[in-house]
Image (cartoon, grey):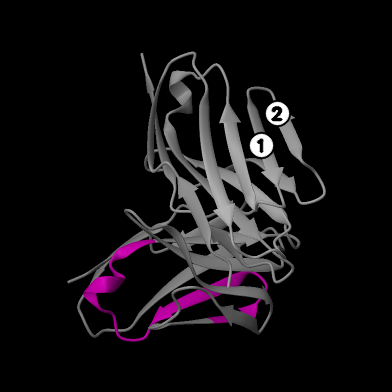
Amino acid sequence: GENVEQHPSTLSVQEGDSAVIKCTYSDSASNYFPWYKQELGKRPQLIIDIRSNVGEKKDQRIAVTLNKTAKHFSLHITETQPEDSAVYFCAASNRDDKIIFGKGTRLHILP
Amino acid sequence: DAGITQSPRHKVTETGTPVTLRCHQTENHRYMYWYRQDPGHGLRLIHYSYGVKDTDKGEVSDGYSVSRSKTEDFLLTLESATSSQTSVYFCATEWGQNTEAFFGQGTRLTVV
């Protein structure tokens, strides 16, 4: 079955700097890659997603890239702000629609 | 937020007792999921459903069963609760395959 690895587990960046979180997946049939943000005590919420027919997608300060050959995808957050502090989860899903999540990255934005 | 409600929100139960968690949605979403969230493990898929009476196992299904007799309700049952099942349980729904998943508020379950 699908396995999703996520790195790093914890990331601290200075406010205003960029943050990058990386994920790899094992199932070459996976074709949908969402990213979720979970603030402390809250439920996870979708922030961006990418499908396998696209290499990059951007939404304001957030971008995601996908390398199908290498089976990895990354989340990039530019000009980080205090409200970006949260746990971020990558996920992969294939035609069976099992959404498998990575273990999460706790992002700290330092003042 | 999408109309997804989990009940109960908090529960403490004794080892060996059966427990049922309920996920109720008003969005008419076809797909429903149960995850557990533990420190260091992220969100792990327990069971999922792609329609009424259509369910399948996820990564960590041992000790859990599910039922979906109506589109709006997805029940998770711990047949005989163990301390290792102490966790936060999240339900999620999707209207279609590979679309945005909406999560419930979570249920904090403690097995003593």
Foreground of the two, B15 or A35: A35
Task: Report x, y in % for residue A88.
Answer: 49, 41
Give residue A64's quadrant in the image: top right
**Left or right of A43 on screen, residue A34:** right
Label 2 and label 1: CA atoms lie apart by 9 Å
Q: Which residue is mark 1?
A: A64
Q: Is residue B76 above or below residue B101?
A: below
Q: Which residue is pictured at 66% across the width and 31% down the height? A: A63
Kindly check if marks 2 and 1 are in contact, taking CB atoms under 8 A apart as contact: no
Q: Which residue is pictured at 57% across the width and 56% down the height? A: B4
Q: Is residue B86 magenta?
A: yes
- Which stretch did the figure color magenta? B67-88
Task: Report x, y in % for residue B84.
Answer: 26, 72
Q: Which residue is pictured at 63% across the width and 28% down the height? A: A62
User: Can see residue B18?
Assistant: yes
Task: Report x, y in % for residue B79.
Answer: 36, 86
Mark 2 or mark 1, whichever is nearer to me: 1
Residue type at mark 1 is Val
Q: Is residue B89 above or below residue B17?
A: above
Give residue B21's quadrant in the image: bottom left
Q: Which residue is pictured at 80% across the width and 44% down the height? A: A54
User: Can see residue B1?
Assistant: no
Residue projecting furthest to the left: B112
Provide the secondary structure element on which disc 2 rests.
strand
Q: Is residue A107 magenta?
A: no
Q: Which residue is mark 2?
A: A59
